[in-house]
Amino acid sequence: MWLFYGLISAVTDAWHNLTIKRQTAALDSLTIAWIRGFFTAIILFPPILFFLPKNLNVIFWIVLLIRTIIDTGAQIIYAESLKFTDLSLAIPALSLTPVAIVGIEYLLTGDIPSNSGWLGISLIVFGMVWLYSGSQKEIGSKFKYIFTHKGGRLMILTAFLWSITTVLHRIAIGESNPIFYGGVSALFIFLGTSIVVFLRNGRKSFSLFPLAAKQGNGIPGILAAATWIFQVLAQSGTLASYAISVKRSSIVFSMFLGKRYLAESIKSRIIPIFIIFSGIILIAIDK
């Protein structure tokens, strides 16, 4: 089931990427992060009343606090990255997340992917880079461009931050349950972005509520909530590196959305798609 959950999270994440990108044309990154967090918390927090864990130790709260600090910054940086570049240059940097997770997960939990898992992750990363390079010959130059482009650098930083929080998610879920952790963490992220907004805007921060209520502005938060639900369900059944690798196939779905709504060409991207899904199959067989 974890693979099914992972694929659903990939689809909703692709739509989330597209809607955030569109919002960057009218809103600043912090406002986008705050509105997103507001709607995500509204959806994820209420259900925790039916899934209260019996005992919560100090480890859970420490992990939650660390995750809140890291993810608050990551959400803002993510939106800022999309402001400076388009999806086809920024989103591929997120394929670096599973690579970073392997090392972090080993240090924190001792989990190591098998040879099949390693090969699957490698194929996904390679395929995603090729997907947005245009051809196999241009992989090196395009990948280098991601590092030299401001939007690409910001997304690489986001990928590294999210690799840390992905591992923290698994630890916190193990100390509670996916529903409870998803709701509490969503509330904490909203509070974290609210603090940053208040420090920047002061009393003017209250003017954001009417903006949040504006038609369409809540869509990214709703999609983020759906993505989170299925992501944590996937991570509960496998290594974090596997779950996040499948979720990163959202780049594939983003490509089709880009063709439909941004008039992007996908002719040269068919082969990379097969490489990415080959990696997903290897990971699934491994489990």
Image (spheres, rainbow, N blue to C red):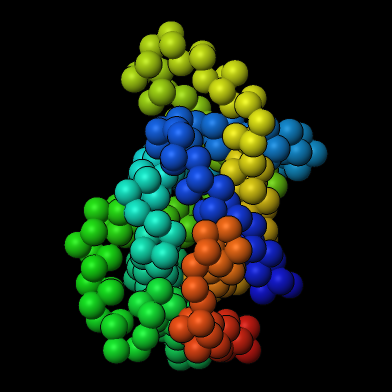
Point out the image quarter for the N terminus.
bottom right
102 sits to left or right of 232:
left
Coordinates of residue 165 in the picture (x, y in percent): 44, 53
Taking the image as drawn, is residue 45 in sight?
A: no
Give me the residue at 36% from left, 77% from top.
133
Give me the residue at 56% from left, 23% from top.
211
200 sits to left or right of 112:
left
* Residue farthest to the right, as pictured: 50
- Which residue is at the front of the view, 37 or 147? 147
* Residue farthest to the top, as pictured: 203
261 sits to left or right of 269:
right
Q: Is residue 135 above or below residue 57?
A: below
Q: Is residue 103 above or below residue 43?
A: below
Coordinates of residue 181 in the picture (x, y in percent): 62, 45
Give me the residue at 46% from left, 16% from top.
205
Coordinates of residue 172 in the picture (x, y in percent): 55, 50
Taking the image as drawn, is residue 137 in sight?
A: yes
Q: Is residue 231 above or below residue 102?
A: above
Q: How many marks?
A: 0
Give me the residue at 52% from left, 59% from top.
262
* Residue farthest to the front, as pictured: 263
- Which residue is at the front of the view, 223 or 51? 223
Res. 48 image quadrant: top right
Point out the image quarter for the C terminus.
bottom right
Coordinates of residue 2 in the picture (x, y in percent): 68, 71
91 sits to left or right of 255:
left
Res. 14 image quadrant: bottom right
